[in-house]
Image: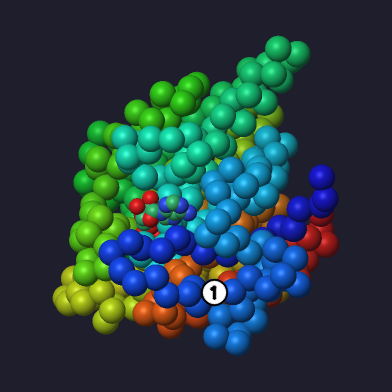
Amino acid sequence: MDKLSAVRIAVREAPYRQFLGRREPSVVEFPPWGDGKSLVVEQNEFHFDHAFPSTVGQDEMYLALILPLVEKALQGFQCTALAYGQTGTGKSYSMGMAPPDKIQKPEHLGVLPRCLADILERVNAKQENEKEPIQVFASFIEIYNEKAYDLLGSSPHTPMVTARCHRCTCLPLSSQEDLQDLLQQGTGNRRVRSTKMNSSSSRSHAIVTIHVKSKTSHARLNIVDLAGSEGVRRTGHEGVAKQEGVNINLGLLSINKVVMSMAAGRTVIPYRDSVLTTVLQDSLTAQSYLTFLACISPHRCDLSETLATLRFGTSAKKLRLNPMQVAR
Ligand code: ADP
Ligand code: MG
């Protein structure tokens, strides 16, 4: 396999939302010269590591974008895959965070169950040759309004002390059934607030971490499903919800700041700027791998959000020209 960059950015276009009726052409174009890496929106050209049109299925996206990360995790590295973008653009679908009962066909399975299948397969194969036990665990955390909740713990509605987030509940994972049970339990404990745009949209970040632990190493694979990044006005919330809107984007910006500080060789890294970066602290080091999946809408009415999402992706590209890679 090619040498994997420490930071990678991909874009995925969502399919049409049916209730929008009349089928207009998508605002997103994938030019034939783009080599699967470029897209054009209203004459703005963008270049990423991957540009997936809505015709690309879960399997293809997983193989191109996430499997290389799983392999790094199995080598002992800390890895994070993070989906961001406007509500309704397929973040939860892509990451496999949707409540399990909603998924019928195997081709719709998202990143999480596919990661687990590959991890268990490799770990089991390794175990046959080596004596050293390898254990696979998972935790499930929600961040809502700058407070973290241990969704698998005994009091999932009481915020954790942020400094102790790394002590959240971990459950053993030895099968897809274990994962389904864990997602069911965790999802049931999430705080869901409906917005004008998507009645089941969540206003919080969700992080499922798969831990692969042996005597000598402890690798983490964080699968992060960020809350919708749309502007507050658009979703029509007031008061508390407005406060949420602010915090929703804080996490994403803080990740950028943390990686930027590491790249600049700073000694003080601003992990404490947000709960998201505090929770991910162990996974955001100079030896870590970080993959962004920017989810965008094909609809013209979402154009400004789409451009904002793509521009954030462009700014994140700067993160890869850094000593993190040189050091490796
Ligand atoms: P988000 O988490 O970004 O708010 P969702 O993942 O909930 O968005 O997606 C919104 C709806 O669109 C869901 O019903 C989901 O199943 C569907 N969906 C999203 N992306 C795809 C896709 N690539 N193929 C099929 N259905 C999709
Ligand atoms: Mg979602």
Direction from residue 243 to residue 37 in the image, left or right = right
| Picture mark count | 1
Q: Residue at x 50, y 21 (%)?
A: 174
Direction from residue 213 to residue 265 in the image, left or right = right
Image quadrant assignment for residue 276: bottom left
Q: Residue at x 38, y 35 (%)?
A: 104
The structure's colour scheme is: rainbow
Direction from residue 209 to residue 228 in the image, left or right = left
Direction bottom: furthest residue: 43
The residue nearer to you, when weighing 19 against 277, is 19
Q: Is residue 27 visible in the rendered structure shown here?
A: yes
In x, y percent, where is residue 284? 59, 56
Image quadrant assignment for residue 40: bottom right
- In this rendering, the answer to whether 25 lies above or below 214 is below
The N terminus, quarter of image: top right
- In this rendering, the answer to whether 58 lies above or below 248 is above
Q: Is residue 272 visible in the rendered structure shown here?
A: no
Q: Secondary structure at mark 1?
A: strand
Residue linked to disc 1: 28
In x, y percent, where is residue 122? 67, 26
The residue nearer to you, when weighing 239 against 84, is 84
The three-letter amino acid code for the residue at tag 1 is: Val
The residue nearer to you, when weighing 123 against 55, is 55
Q: Residue at x 48, y 74 (%)?
A: 25
Q: Residue at x 81, y 58 (%)?
A: 327
Direction front: furthest residue: 22
